[in-house]
Image (cartoon, rainbow, N blue to C red):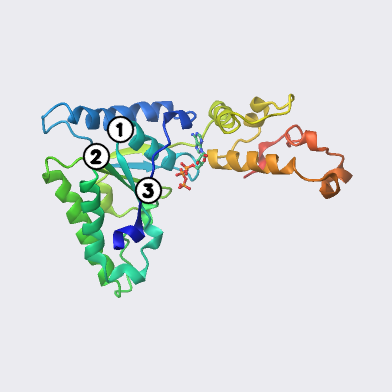
Amino acid sequence: IIASQLVLAENMSTSWRDIAGLQSTIRELRDTVIVPIQARRKHSSQLIRPPKGVLLHGPPGCGKTLLARAVAKEAGCRFINLDVSLLTDKWYGESQKLAGAVFSLATKIQPCIIFIDEVDSFLRVRSSGDHEATAMMKAQFLQQWDGLATDQDALVLVMAATNRPLDVDRAILRRLPASFYIKPPGEREREAILKLILKGESLADDIDLKYIAQHTNSFSGSDLKELCRHAAVYRLRSPDDDLSGSEGEGEEDVYKSAPSSSDDILP
Ligand code: ATP
C-alpha cells in the first residue's frame, strides 16, 4: 500500500529520439548501463553488471529525467519513479515497510530502474533529533540497496538526479559510482531542442530557429519548451488583447523582436 502511494511504475515512451544534443552522455550511458544490462541476459558471468547506481547532476531542466526514462526504455527496463516529495512525516512511521516495498517491487518486476529525483533532499536526517524514523528509513533503504549487490540475479539499478550534488548524503553518493554531469545546452543544442519541440507544428515562414538559439543563451531545454508554449498561446490571442501594440510589435514579430542581448530575455 505504501509503495503504491510513493512510487509510480511508468509506461515508458521516452527514447533517445526524444533527446536533442547530449550525444556524448548518451554514448557513455549506453556503454556503462545499457550494454551490461542487455549482455546480462545472454551471459552468465557475474562480472557483467551495470554499476550499483548512477548519478545525473546538473542545472534544472536540462534533461536528467528525460535521460533516465530513455535509459530504462532503451535497456528494456521497468521504471519506478520514487517520489521523494511524498516522504513527509506522515509516512515516517512506516519507514521500514517503505524501503522493503520499493526494492521488493523492483526485484519482482526486474529488470528495473528505481529513479530518485532530487536525491539531495532524500533521506536527509535533520539535526533536530525528532527524526529518528528518517534515520531508520535511511538505514533500511541503504541496507536493501546493498542487498542488491549480493543478489546475483537481481537486475535492479538505482538512478538518481540532483541539481545540488554537494548536498547529497555521502552514504548515498558512495552508492552512485557512475556520475554524469548534464550540462546546459549550447547554441547548437538549443537549436536542436527547438527543432524537436516544434516538430510537427506549423510555423510561420520567417521563423529562424538559429536566431532564437543565438539569443537564448542561458535557457535550459525546459525554458525553451516554455518559450515555445508561450509563443503558441500568444498567437491565439485576439487583436484586442494585444497590449504591446502601442510599442509597435505585431504578432508576427514574436521571435524576431527578441532583444539583441540574451541578458534581456533571461528565463
Ligand atoms: P529538474 O532538475 O528540474 O528535475 P531535469 O534536468 O530532470 O530537470 P527534464 O525534466 O529532463 O529536466 O526536462 C524538462 C523538459 O525540458 C523535458 O520534458 C523536455 O521537454 C525539455 N528538455 C530538456 N532537455 C532536453 C533535451 N536535451 N532534449 C529535448 N528536450 C529537452
Whether ligand 1 has any atom under 8 Å from the Cβ at mark 1 is answered as no
Q: Which mark is residue 75?
A: 1
Left or right side of 129 for 15: right
Q: Which residue is mark 2?
A: 111
- For this orientation, the residue located farthest to the bottom is 130
Q: Residues within 10 Å of mark 3 (few under 14, many from 20)?
A: some
* Amino acid type assigned to the residue bearing label 3 in the image: Pro
Locate residue 95, reporting x and y percent.
Answer: 25, 66
Q: Is residue 171 visible?
A: no
Question: Whole-percent x and y of residue 244?
Answer: 83, 45
Whether residue 27 is visible, yes or no, is yes
Mark toward the start of the polypeptide (1 vs 2): 1
Count the numbered circles shown: 3
Nearest the viewer among 228 and 266 is: 228
Q: Earlier in the sequence, mark 1 or mark 3?
A: 1
Regarding mark 3 in the picture, which secondary structure is present there?
helix
Residue 113 percent coordinates (x, y) = 29, 43
| Residue in the image at 65% along x and 27% along y | 209
Residue identified by numbered label 3: 165
Depth order, front residue of 75/129: 75
- At label 2, counting other C-alpha atoms closer than 10 Å, the crowd grade (few under 14, some 14-19, many 20 or more) is many
